[in-house]
Amino acid sequence: MDYTVYGLAVETLAGAVPMRRIPVRPDQLRSLCSAVHEAGGFIHALWASDVRDTTGGFLLRVALQDDVGLVVIELLLPAATPHFPSIADIFPAADRMQRAAYDLLGVRAEAADRRSWVRHAAWPDDCFPLRHDYDATRPHADADERYPFVRVTGDGVHEIAVGPVHAGTIEPAHFRFSVVGEKVLRIEERLGYTHKGIEKRFETLPALQAHKLAARVSGDSAVAFSWAYCMALEMICGISPPVRAIWLRALYLERERIANHLGDLGALGNDAGFSIALAQFSRLKEDLLRINQAAFGARYLMDVVVPGGVARDLDETHRQILLETIPGIESELNTLREIYDDHAGLQDRFSGTGRVAPALARQLGLVGLAGRASGQTWDWRCDPVYAPYDALNVRIAGSLDGDVAGRVSVRFQETFESLRLSRIILENLPRTECGAALPDVPAGGFGVGLVEGWRGPVLVALETGDGGRIRRCHPHDPSWQNWPVVEHATIGNIVPDFPLINKSFNLSYSGQDL
Amino acid sequence: MLRTLRQVIKVGVVSERAARPAGERPKESGLRAQIHQRFGRALGIRHVDAGSCNGCELEIHAVNNPYYNLEGFGIKFVASPRHADLLLVTGPVSRHMESALKRVYDATPDPKWVIAVGDCGCTGGIFGSGYAIRGSVADIIPVDLTVPGCPPPPAAILSGIVSVVTTDRR
């Protein structure tokens, strides 16, 4: 899109992911968002920063995806009345992000849902943890825990309250079902239970060490977050890692994708009563993790992506082992896919369950693998391409079905594709260094990293302060955008299908609670 | 159906004795007998995520995979704390999960054990002691054993479960 026709100043920032930065006035925010939405764009993230000590007031940022790439809109809000016009009617996914921005920084979206989102009882509603003058030692009574869920009334309507502790080994959240008999009329999510103050924690860490914290925003997306974090930091430092390091990062990312898809494909079969699938897929996943341990020194690749490159090089022996094991996984996966496709009982549970039609997906801004399963043909590895994916020609997965079956199909497609990409990476791994020295981290820097993780686009926005420290860091998981869509996907289904629907998205709780 | 059976037969039984915990290394049947003697039934485990990044959950899932085969010991995961003998707690305890964790602990019948799994559960870990964190698991409820690691590998989790059951004489 050409933003100069709106009379806006556009600054292009160079980095692994080129980004355009556009400062706007309050009256321009909504019209610009509408223009991007009408042109087929969607929202990545919305967050704010306390800049009262530098430029004055609070800085609201909205990261959008348009036809060219990443755009970050900036709106400076006055310190006394940090209010801004809500964009939740344009991008529904912005609603919870706006509420979290209020909970953490006291910046208020006008004419919007005012219920707290990430704040439960941990701090009162008149203080804001991400403000620089927040006093964590100030004693306060635990705030009111009651949350005003939307009530559904009518003959025979009753509520089922589930969580925060669930029956399985999963993360905590509360789900409030309003049902008639078995049929779900409405489900409302309440998250925030695993809120750990990660963004505040970043501000206590040196920028050159915080990739470890980034990797633990959502443990299942460690590579995606640590890579996005390093991208943002490398953008600020004006350096680019050696080619081999970038290729190795992509190898880690694809193996993270394969591991998660294998785990979820097995769990989906299990949730539909086909426990053999769980045994088979979890065996394949364990094989993969053990090779990770041997080749990279870790089963889950928490600390392998480091600023400037990767933590250790891949030796020739393990490069060969990684290559040799790919055909075996492909062959097993083919067999399991045939078993899934042929299993009438399984298909009966998957087909038509938890459907999100493409038009609804577009309206709500569904992203990542769930978006691709609902006809949203966007994958950050394909469009626009960044290194090394520009050399790999990623084939985008997709389905128009938008149901559990569609998401299962996309996971199979993407696992096969990641195996193909892994083979190309391993066969063509450039022979360069795998790490670069970083200069002193400049103060006052702003950088953004964006990586297509297994779940969807993972964004990290970073601001640096004096002495190589972090002034502000916002790690953003695509679960923010996709959680509200799970509510829509569940409407009209029966209660026992909710675990299956939920698992087909498998969203992160920790990644959105922060 | 035939394809499924063929796959099951082709793969066969992959459970590993080698992955069993070192040291005491109880025989599978011996441990099962011990658990049965004490409880008169299988040992029930309830997992509670008290604020984890979900890394530990992935490795807790793994102890149920065919290689580690936790159920082969006569140990199973249960859906309610009221059915549990052992709590596996992960994460630094967030302020928002503190009361839920206490309630789960109170709902678990005696005798019960608690294992804190992962660096965060053991010490608070990388997330430090911010405004939203209460501390390690032991800061909130009594803990019998800690299994450090980020995340701890399944063999370590398995070893922790086995040692708490075999060494405690309560």
Image (spheres, helix red, strand yellow):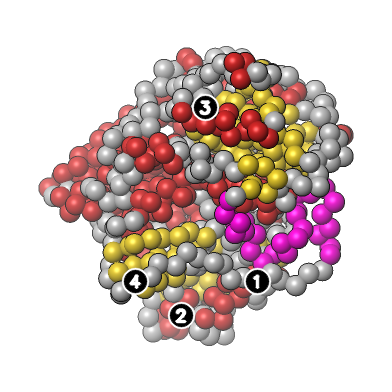
- Which quarter of the rendered picture does the C terminus of chain B lie within? bottom right
Q: How many marks?
A: 4
On screen, B3 above or below A452?
below
Distance in Å between CA atoms under marks 3 and 2 = 54 Å
What chain does mark 3 sit on? A
Q: Is residue A315 magenta?
A: no
Label 2 sits on residue: B82
Residue A115 part of the magenta-drawn span: yes
Q: CA distance from mark 2 to mark 4?
A: 34 Å
Q: Nearer the viewer, residue B148 or B52?
A: B52
On the image, numbered disc 4 is attached to which residue?
A: A154
Relative to A280, residue B105 above or below = below
Letter of the chain that mark 4 sits on in the rendering: A
Residue that numbered label 3 is attached to: A35
Q: Tag 1, which chain?
A: A
Q: Quadrant of residue A20?
A: top right
Of pointers 1 and 4, the one earlier in the residue sequence: 1
Residue type marked 1: Asp
The image quadrant that residue B116 belongs to is bottom right
Image x and y of residue B132, in percent = 70, 60
Furthest residue in direction left, as rendered: B2
